[in-house]
Amino acid sequence: MSRIFLFFIIFLSFKSQAAVVKINGECDAPDQIVRLIVVKDYVSNLEHTLISTKTDVAGKFVLSIDLDEITVAQLALGLDRAEIVLSPGANYICKLSQTRSSSTVSYFEKEPLDLEVLESNDNGVQKNIDDINMIFNAFVMQYFDDLYRNKRIDLLDSLRIAIADRLPERTAVFVSDYNTYKQASLLQTIRGRSAEQWMRNLIIDKPVLYTNPEYMNLLNEVFRDYLISNRFYQQDELNRRISEGTAAFKQFISKNPLLKPNDQLIELVGLINLRDLYYNPSFKKSEIILLLKQFQSESKFVQHKKIAANIIESVNYLSFNSDAPAFTLKNQSAREVSLKDFRGRNLVLIFVQDSCKTCLNALKEVKTLYEKFSNEYDFVTIATTEGFKNYVKLFVQNDFKWTLLNLSENILLLEAYHVKTFPEFFLILKEGRMGMAPAPQPDQNLEYHMLRLKER
């Protein structure tokens, strides 16, 4: 009997093992970083790079990774991204093309990357998801006014039929759920949050699909700010329950009879709301972090432990007194300069790009701040590779005397600092910790914050 039991355990372990996913890709960008990125969970939306490589001289690359379930990921070429749906054991041949139209467009974009899957053996999962998204997006664009202004719920039957006609009779469960909850999100947007029977059919009495983005998108939409907008809850009591720990907090949420029978959903609704309440000035950040730590250690749901930990990590990233992302870059003399070289003095960090008149105007205002604060602050400007030579000339022409560094191939530093527009300013404290991220422009009271932080 023991041998049979041992064989059964071994069999189950083999059944649950991950299968290798292989991506063979090509693009017109030799020697560039290629990454496969996922979110750790769809509550915190904290990102994680599964694997990275570089394209070769011909722009080709190979990525291999073990996955144990269908996973929505982002394939990133440099900072440009495109969504790809990966099935365990499948192989993909794909082509990437960057579509940025000009150098004046923001250097940091989320999805200006075109992805074409030329071949795959994933039983049609990627194509099915692409078809759903294409039909859905076209439908919303065509009927936008009727849907969002006139609340034409009857039109959704046409969407359902159009998608059903494109999909095969049998699809992966993931695809079926993705389709169901994508359409449900549109229905939720039109109806609002009051349709409890509809919520019961789609959420309350259904399993939690943590890794399906459309399910989680609907869940986030339905329960965002739920504890401060629903008639069952009072804000003063919510504040008190947060300070009393997980049991009191969950008991408070269960006052809604719709949620009361489902402890798993109660916790998840609580985590979604704690994520947002952290930024609400009516609640104490320290108490919310403490409650999240209690969920991380006490929850009986493994996913909830991870979500709580990820929320803590996400709200702390680039927050005041957190570690500033390190860098080592070269100046115009090709000498390496690191963040640690500025320890002991506060730092004004400025990111700029080429063809940016706003950047030059801002730097001219920085000159005034430099002359006023050079005894208390160091100043560093980091220019993107395309603009570095121009900024070398501009620094000489305008008598800018602070440090200028070349971003060069270190473009992921922009991602590390969440740089989305140019110029972008940051204040870093003496110990290499964040003072303010991002900081305002010089003409938007940057000096006030420099004064505020200089004695810390």
Image (cartoon, helix red, strand yellow):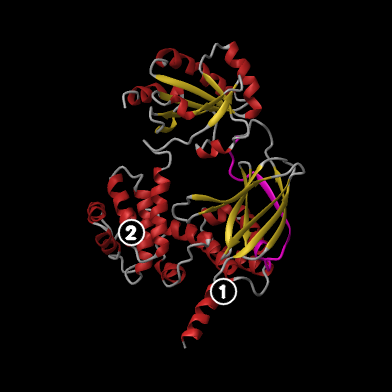
Residue 102 in view, yes or no: yes
Q: Pointers 2 and 1 in contact (CB under 8 A)?
A: no
Quarter of the picture containing the C terminus is top left
**Left or right: 211 in relation to 353:** left
**SS category of the residue bearing label 2:** helix
Q: Dot 1 corresponds to which residue?
A: 15
Which tag, 2 or 1, sits closer to the chain's start? 1
Callout 1: 10 Å neighbours few (<14), some, many (20+)? few
SS class, disc 1: helix
Q: Residue furthest front?
A: 3
Estimate the x, y position of residue 433 in percent, counting from the top left. Answer: 40, 33
Name the residue furthest bottom: 1
Identify the residue at image location x=36%, y=54%: 273
Q: Residue placed at 40% from the left, 45% from the top?
A: 315
Query: What is the magenta range?
Result: 107-126
Q: Which label belongs to residue 297?
A: 2
Amino acid type of the residue that numbered disc 2 sits on in the rendered structure: Ser
